[in-house]
Amino acid sequence: MSPPSREPRSSVILYALIDTGSEAVECRVRNLSDTGACVDNAAGLVQGAEIRVTMGTLEQLVARVMWAKPTLAGLHFEDRIDIAAARRARTRNTGVQPSAGWMQHIRDAYRDRG
């Protein structure tokens, strides 16, 4: 009997935030399909663990670690994902509003231009 077929994977260069429940770690995504991904194992993932993945504009995707090696891990998403949304740039909210002295009122039509 042959092993079950797997979805075609695309090689990608993007990062995902992996939330293990005890920590959140940025990991490089090596390849991606609508059902899973291969990521760098910077989070110390172990086979069978359930994690949350944020990548692109997709947030808190539920995934299970199907296999794990010291350097790589294979993830299976609970639901199929939109690959285009996963590839979109992810905003990083640091909680700090950008501001800088003289730049603060740069768009103010009544600022002193003198």
Image: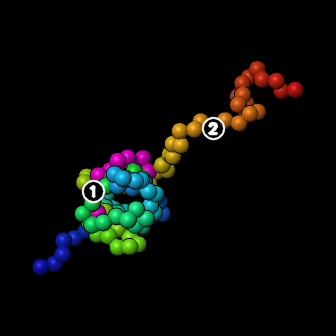
- Please, what secondary structure does the residue beneath circle 1 have? strand
Considering the image in quadrants, where does the N terminus appear?
A: bottom left
Q: Which is the main secondary structure of the residues drawn in magenta?
A: strand
Q: Amino acid at mark 2?
A: Pro
Residue that numbered label 1 is attached to: 50
- Front-most of 29 and 99? 99
Residue 43 placed where, x, y %? Answer: 40, 62
Q: Quadrant of residue 16?
A: bottom left
The label shown at residue 113 is none
The label shown at residue 98 is 2
Considering the image in quadrants, where does the C terminus appear?
A: top right
Residue 60 placed where, x, y %? Answer: 35, 47
Q: Report the residue at 38% width, 48% height from top.
A: 58
What's drawn in magenta, residue-wise? 56-65
- Front-most of 9 and 48? 48
Q: Report the residue at 44% width, 57% height from top.
A: 25
